[in-house]
Image (cartoon, helix red, strand yellow):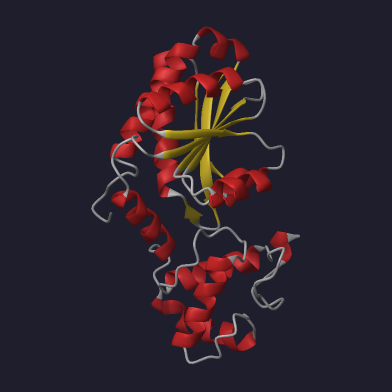
Amino acid sequence: MEASYKLYDRLLYRRSPPLRGDDVAELQLRLSQLGFDTGRVDGILGENTAKALMDFQQNAGLVPDGICGPSTIKTLDRMRTRGNPKNLVTGVREKELLRLAPKTLRGKKIALGEMGGLNPLVSALTRSLISKGANVFSIHHPNPSKQASILNKAKVEVFLEFSFGDNNIGISTSYYSGYKYESVGGKYLSELIQNQLPSLLQVPNLGSKGMSTIILRETIMPAVVCELFPPSLVVERLPQLVEIITSTLTTWSLTPFEFTLSS
């Protein structure tokens, strides 16, 4: 249903529950390309997107009513070529927030989750991170949208979720990627974990990949889902897992995204 909407198909405005769809994502992309910060490009018309829309309307000499209709779309079309599709203000904002964050685990608000059977790992990792001075809490909720809402309201700085994989022996990680946008902080943490865990534990490396699952899409902080299999891997190598993940989070805190000349 979400994928069926195009930007010209309906009026877009903030409501509860929020409008969702490819048309919302296209609006977010266009506004972000023009320098209006919609927050994460996720296809969900929330508070940040509504504010960015009104800011654009005001700057373009339109009525700032927060409703994206024909006149707003026509103005977006006219200004479309002015924005650089590779330089979204949302990505710039995420990098700046990460750049300004303390380069230590001490005081960092970290949330840990697990999808069943991995509570010993979460509990041990919680103790390890707290010993480094981090502010850690675990979250357990069957509804991923509700879980994401709790994490967002708590202003969590980074979220790690663990689950058992789908019978493929090894370790894989995923981060948010969708609508021509990806979380730079989530991607780098995912790659750091993937570069460390499989080799040090001597298990197959199943790769790091961008995904748009609910928990990755609706959380606004860098978030990574780590899948491990078989369950005996966690039982037999729990201390190693905890040590490696703690070390990786420490490294990520120092350099939370991959610096390039354009960074």
The single residue placed furthest to the right in the displayed view is 1
The quadrant in which the C terminus is found is bottom left
Q: Quadrant of residue 199?
A: top left
Rendered location of residue 122, percent (x, y): 54, 24
Determine whether 2 is above or below 234 in the image. below
Please indicate whether residue 237 sits to the left or right of residue 106 in the image: right
The quadrant in which the N terminus is found is bottom right
Q: Residue at x 40, y 62 (%)?
A: 86
Question: Would you say residue 213 is visible in this rendering?
Answer: no
Please indicate whether residue 232 sits to the left or right of residue 35 in the image: right
Which residue occupies the foreground of this view, 70 or 219? 219
Rendered location of residue 103, percent (x, y): 28, 40
Q: Residue at x 60, y 85 (%)?
A: 65
Rendered location of residue 160, percent (x, y): 51, 34
Which residue occupies the foreground of this view, 44 or 178? 44
Q: Quadrant of residue 141?
A: top right
The single residue placed furthest to the left in the displayed view is 261
Rendered location of residue 15, percent (x, y): 69, 70
Q: Residue at x 28, y 38 (%)?
A: 254
Which residue occupies the foreground of this view, 165 or 246? 246
Please indicate whether residue 204 sits to the left or right of residue 253 in the image: right
Determine whether 164 is above or below 216 in the image. above
